[in-house]
Image (tube, rainbow, N blue to C red):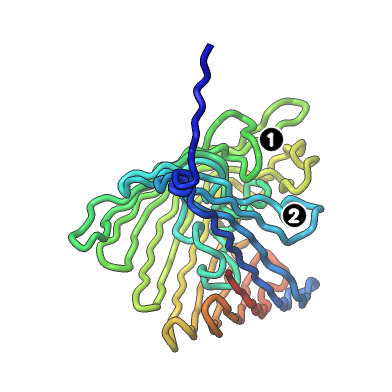
Amino acid sequence: MCAVILYIDAQDKKEIFSKPRLSGYAIGQYQYSGKHKAESNTFSLRMVRLSLDGRIMNDFAYKIQGQINGNTSTLGESPRVVDVFIEWQKYKFIKVKAGQFKRPFTFENPMNPIDQGFMSYAQNITSLAGFNDRVGEHASNGRDIGIQLQGDLLGTQSGRALLHYQIGVFNGQGINTKDVDNQKDVIGGLWVMPIEGMRIGAFGWTGSYARKDETGIKSLSKRRYAISGEYVINDWTFRSEYIHSTGYSFKNTYNEKSDLNKTEIDYAKGDKADGFYVLGIAPIIKNKFHLKARYDMYRPNAEWDTSKTNYEIGADFEFVKNLKLSAEYVYVNDRSLEKHNYSMIDTQLSFRF
């Protein structure tokens, strides 16, 4: 009998494992809403996150990120792990990521909440990309557990890629949750970058979301596509995305464990939904002070009688690097309400380290 002992001296260890980097950000918020019979104005902590990332053998990147604010009463508001993944990044034309991370669906979903530019992600992103998904899934911040391939192709002489692809296979149940029906979600995207700063892409998503009660497993299909465009140049930003979804939803959103046994389907809500947004961010002082506007429309049953449209204008100012103040006025037209129109005011102070 023999034993093999692997010994790594300090110098070798240093080369294999880079020094982990701790980072994070926080977003404080004040919001007023004039919604009829639901008026409110409140200060809150929108988001506080900490992350640890580094490299292994220079070819692998890893990240662990948690959201640490909130209470412990519901899945949507409780502190939770949002990212845990490792990605092989040796080649630009093919990278392999495994773990829990952002679903490869839409341009806006992968963006940091501060970089996204407005008081929240657009309604179609939050409802159809896995944030507060219409299907009834718990709040998952656009993430799921799975594996993904992505890469850049057709590089120019300057090194800029002309084509990007990404495709992944996921549980379909959201963050920190095992698969229920043993059917996987397949999500992919492809976009071209014809000129510097421009992306034009399309995304597809097919899969299911499932729950189990005393009668067995009930699965609801998810069939979605998105058309996306973005142009970012000299601190100007223009972005627009349309998403269409087919598939029913459960009546109860998964907030507590007992909700997983509630499998009643919301047929009145219908099996279709769609949404569209277009936004522009203009620099008044480059990388310092911006004015911005967004048209944000979502139809929870793909019909105009229940559409909700936000007309937003605002500004943001960066005092120093990584310390930003933003403010918006929002005129809301929600046709599902008795009184369709009301106003909102949102201000946010954010910092990163």
Q: Is residue 325 left or right of residue 110?
A: right
Whether residue 167 is visible? no
Residue 141 placement: quadrant: bottom right
Residue 142 percent coordinates (x, y): 57, 53
Whether residue 339 is visible? yes
Give the labeled residue for mark 2.
78
Q: Is residue 279 left or right of residue 336?
A: left
Q: Residue at horizontal 27%, vertical 57%? A: 161
The quarter of the picture where the C terminus appears is: bottom right
Residue farthest to the top, as pictured: 1
Depicted 322 relative to depicted 241: above or below:
below
N-term-proximal mark, 1 vs 2: 2
Give the labeled residue for mark 1.
211
Q: Is residue 205 left or right of residue 198?
A: right
Q: Residue at horizontal 66%, vertical 76%? A: 341
The front one of 84 and 72 is: 84
Q: CA distance from mark 1 to mark 2?
A: 21 Å
Using a 10 Å C-alpha cutoff, classify the residue at mark 1 as few (fewer than 14 neighbours), some (14 to 19) or many (20 or more).
many
Kind of residue sitting beneath label 1: Arg
Residue 260 percent coordinates (x, y): 74, 38
Depicted 316 relative to depicted 63: above or below:
below
Q: Residue at horizontal 57%, vertical 40%? A: 172
The front one of 186 and 72 is: 72
Q: Residue at horizontal 80%, vertical 53%? A: 72
Q: Circle 2 — which element?
A: loop
